[in-house]
Image (cartoon, rainbow, N blue to C red):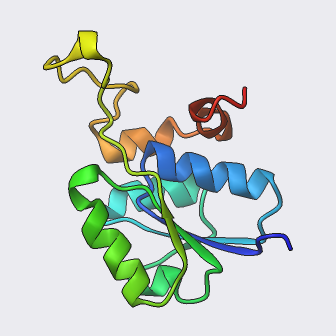
Amino acid sequence: MALRRLAIVGTGLIGASVGLAAKRAGVEHVSGYDADPDALAVAAERGAVDLAAGSLVAAVEEAELAIVATPVARLAEDVGAVLEAGAGVTELGGTCTDSRPEAAGSGAPLWPDASAAASAAIAASAIVFLMTFGQV
C-alpha cells in the first residue's frame, strides 16, 4: 500500500528534503508544521509541503505517517505531541553539526547555513535526503 498522506514536523533542511522526496515519489499530500513560520513558508514556497499548517495537531490530523525532523533538544516533546494527536510517527532528529570525533567541540555546521532554519529550507533537496541514507 502506497503512502498517500504524510505530515512533516520541522521543515528545515531535513524535513523539507523529506517533503520534496515524498512528492517526487508520488505521495499525494504532504502537510507540514514548524515552530518557525519563516521556515514553514520557505518549505511551502519550495513545494516541500502542500499545506503549511498552523499547528502540529493540524498538520498530523489526517496523516498516515508523521515524520518529526526537529532538533534533538525538541525531539521527545515533538514526537510525544504527534503520538498524543494519534498519528503514527518516525523521527529524523538531528544536531545539524558535524558529529565526527575529529570535529568534537568545533560546533561546525554539518550543512551550509543549517543554523538558520529558513535558509536551511532553501537548501532542501530530495537528493539531500537520499544522500543522508546512502542512496545516491
**In the displayed structure, does residue 46 sit left or right of residue 77?**
right
Residue 114 visible (yes or no): yes
- Give me the residue at 61% from left, 38% from top: 125
Query: Position of 3 compared to 126: left or right?
Result: right
Residue at 59%, 33% (x, y): give it: 128
Residue 54 visible (yes or no): no
Which quadrant would residue 101 be assigned to in this image?
top left
Q: Residue furthest left?
A: 105
| Relative to 89, residue 11 above or below | above
Counting from the top left corner in percent of width and height, residue 66 is at 54, 71
> What residue is at 33 percent from the left and 35 percent from the top?
96
For residue 127, above or below residue 98: below
The answer to which of 54 and 132 lies nearer the viewer is 132
Work out which quarter of the rendered image holds the C terminus and state it: top right
Residue 12: x %, y % from top left: 42, 49
| Viewer-proximal residue among 102 and 122 | 102
Q: Residue at x 50, y 35 (%)?
A: 123
Residue at far right of view: 1
Q: Where residue 4 sits: x, y (%)?
A: 77, 75
